[in-house]
């Protein structure tokens, strides 16, 4: 069973709706209800823990009985458990939905099984629609479910010849203001932001997420300091709106375990080359953000140090997911490549066999 063109278009709308929801412990999910002609009857998205799930939000905008025989298009497999809210699979069944199309399967053993429950109720179910796009949207949350630790994004800024600073150690600013604004936007999406004690001593960063005018953004990541050296009581990080977490250790696995216990889902690593390299060497970087400025610095202050690669066969290969111009700078976003990624340009098997128009995303 495959999705039709209207359902692919609706999935793009659902993916855009999902982005309206907050990041955090719960996934960002969007939902669209289609009528028999493929027109949109209702839209919904999840607004955070304890609020209606996307499917329930969309159904709530229809009159009783109006969803009977209609199609629900959802970015994540409808849940099959009762938490703060009831199971979405049961709500779809009760509403009389005749067909459910979703993008990504729920990997959480507690909440998964919704698709099977829907099929048992006689509802047509189609999975994997725009799976690649849905997977990218949900990647941080999916990684947490799969790995049992926070999703880790490692970021650095570098010259085009791979340097993080000039020979005297100065680095402000390698990149321009559009790139720095993008960093602050991404900080605000994270639950926590980490640096090493060396960066605290060298740069005395505040680790806040700020607007162009310097004002604090609404959401601030919790500051995290990792390293065996102490942090001065006068450090700027001590004036952060949220009290910093200081880990006097080099055991990154232990740090991530504690952060998970504290509810951290997304960790943004902004430390210097030592901390960035440590996360990569340990295989703990789920995303890499490299901000590249068209400037040459030379010297030895590389953006990365030793990451455990002694020969080309040990190279840590990445899969580029996006390249973006930010003023004069480039932002390359990449993830660790799976063994079968190298040299593969095959399309997502769940994509439609003919071109589709650009969606809302």
Image (cartoon, helix red, strand yellow):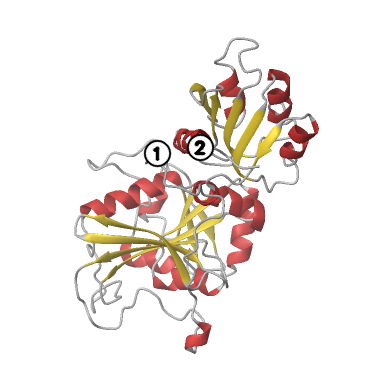
Q: Which residue occupies the foreground of this view, 317 or 150? A: 317
Q: Which residue occupies the foreground of this view, 65 or 184? A: 65
Measured from the top left, where is residue 138 in percent x and y? 54, 47
Are circles 2 and 1 on residues that touch, CB within 8 Å?
yes
Above or below residue 209? Residue 100 is above
Q: Which residue occupies the foreground of this view, 207 or 346? A: 346
Measured from the top left, where is residue 96 in percent x and y? 70, 20
Answer with mark 2 or mark 1, whichever residue precedes in sequence.
2
Q: Is residue 199 visible?
A: yes
Residue at label 1? 359
Circle 1 sits in a helix, a strand or a loop, which is it? loop
Measured from the top left, where is residue 184 in percent x and y? 34, 48
Q: Residue at x 28, y 49 (%)?
A: 181
From this viewpoint, which residue is outermost toward the right? 120
Residue 132's label in the rendered image is none
Question: Quadrant location of the N terminus?
Answer: top right
From this viewpoint, which residue is outermost toward the bottom? 311
Residue 11's label in the rendered image is 2
Q: Which residue occupies the foreground of this view, 318 or 124? A: 124
Determine which quarter of the picture holds residue 212: top left
Mark 1 Cα-neighbour bin, 10 Å: few <14, some 14–19, many ≥20: some
Circle 2 sits in a helix, a strand or a loop, which is it? helix
Count of residue discs: 2
In this picture, residue 195 sits left or right of residue 25: left
In this picture, residue 50 sits left or right of residue 185: right
Q: Is residue 228 visible?
A: no
In this picture, residue 169 sits left or right of residue 153: left
Q: Residue at x 52, y 46 (%)?
A: 130
Mark 2 Cα-neighbour bin, 10 Å: few <14, some 14–19, many ≥20: many
Measured from the top left, where is residue 288 in percent x and y? 44, 63
Above or below residue 150? Residue 164 is below
Q: Residue at x 58, y 48 (%)?
A: 141
């Amino acid at each position: 069973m495959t999705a039709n063109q209207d359902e692919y278009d609706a999935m793009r709308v659902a993916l855009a709706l999902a982005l309206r929801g907050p990041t955090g412990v719960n996934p960002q999910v969007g939902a669209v209800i289609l009528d028999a002609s493929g027109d949109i009857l209702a839209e919904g998205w999840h607004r955070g823990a304890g609020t209606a799930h996307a499917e329930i939000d969309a159904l709530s905008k229809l009159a009783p009985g109006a969803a009977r025989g209609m199609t629900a298009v959802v970015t994540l497999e409808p849940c099959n458990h009762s938490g703060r809210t009831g199971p979405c699979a049961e709500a779809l069944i009760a509403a009389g939905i005749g067909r459910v199309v979703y993008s990504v399967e729920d990997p959480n053993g507690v909440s998964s099984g919704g698709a099977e429950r829907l099929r048992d109720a006689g509802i047509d179910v189609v999975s994997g629609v725009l799976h690649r796009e849905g997977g990218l949207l949900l990647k941080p949350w999916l990684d947490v479910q799969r790995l049992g630790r926070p999703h880790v994004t490692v970021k650095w800024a570098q010259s085009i010849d791979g340097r993080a600073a000039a020979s005297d150690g100065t680095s402000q600013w390698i990149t321009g203001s559009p790139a720095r604004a993008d960093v602050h936007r991404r900080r605000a999406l994270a639950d926590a932001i980490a640096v090493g004690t060396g960066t605290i001593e060298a740069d005395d960063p505040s680790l806040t997420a700020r607007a162009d005018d310097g004002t604090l953004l609404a959401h601030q990541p919790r500051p995290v300091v990792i390293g065996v050296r102490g942090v001065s009581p006068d450090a700027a990080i001590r004036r952060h709106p949220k009290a910093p977490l200081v880990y006097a250790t080099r055991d990154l696995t232990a740090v991530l375990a504690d952060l998970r216990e504290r509810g951290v889902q997304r960790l943004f690593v902004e430390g210097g080359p030592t901390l960035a390299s440590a996360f990569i060497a340990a295989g703990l970087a789920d995303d890499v953000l490299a901000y590249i400025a068209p400037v040459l610095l030379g010297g030895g202050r590389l953006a990365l140090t030793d990451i455990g690669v002694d020969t080309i066969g040990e190279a840590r290969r990445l899969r580029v997911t996006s390249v973006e111009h930010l003023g004069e700078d480039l932002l390359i976003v990449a993830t660790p490549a799976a063994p079968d990624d190298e040299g593969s340009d095959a399309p997502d098997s769940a994509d439609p066999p003919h071109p589709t128009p650009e969606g809302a995303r």
